Image (spheres, helix red, strand yellow):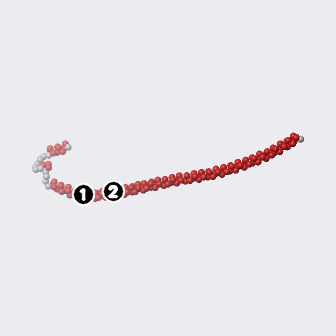
Amino acid sequence: MVNFSILISSSEINGPGGLFDINATLPLVAIQFLLLMVVLNILLYNPLLTVITERNEYILNNLAKASEIVAEANKLTAQYEQELNTVRKEAQLEITNSQKIHKEILEIELNISQKYIDNLLDTITADLTEKKNIAINSLDNIVQSLCQKIETKLSI
């Protein structure tokens, strides 16, 4: 900054315009700048801008497709989760029903078995009672005959 102020203060003013003399070079530089701007715009910036816009469109298309795929995947996931829940509920109901059926079958079989065992016990008890009575009667007869034999032997 100091150098710039020294340059301005040390410049000599010789002739018209001095440091800022406007002659034919300024319009020539302006035309040259505009021509260079047009050439660069045509050769460099337009192809670069088209590539950038194509790339943006490609990215936007891919993002749109990806969002559609994600939305469809979410929809399918929700559908499959709903189906899974209904199948789970059906399976749970089926398990509960089969448990009830098996419990009822087991109760029926237990009742039948209990009745069979009760009948068998009644039959065995009746048979044992009958055999006991027969044994008691036969023992009673044997005891009476022994008593008679003892009385006869004692009376002799």
As drawn, 8 above or below 45: above
The one nearer the camera, 130 or 25, is 130
Point out residue 39 in the picture as x, y percentages from the top left corner.
23, 58
Quadrant that contains the N terminus:
top left
Dot 1: element:
helix
Q: CA distance from mark 2 to mark 1?
A: 26 Å
Q: Amino acid at mark 2?
A: Leu
Give the residue drawn at x 15%, y 45%.
8
Mark 2 Cα within 10 Å, few/some/many (few <14, many 20+)?
few
- N-term-proximal mark, 2 vs 1: 1
Point out residue 30 in the picture as x, y percentages from the top left corner.
18, 55
Give the residue drawn at x 51%, y 53%.
93
Q: Which mark is residue 109?
A: none
Q: Amino acid at mark 1?
A: Asn
Point out residue 150 in the picture as x, y percentages from the top left corner.
85, 42
Dot 2: element:
helix
Q: Which mark is residue 60?
A: 2
Give the residue drawn at x 20%, y 55%.
33
Q: Is residue 55 visible?
A: no
Point out residue 75 in the picture as x, y percentages from the top left corner.
41, 56
The one nearer the camera, 73 or 150, is 150
Q: Is residue 86 visible?
A: yes
Q: Is residue 108 left or right of residue 67?
A: right
**Residue named by callout 1:** 41
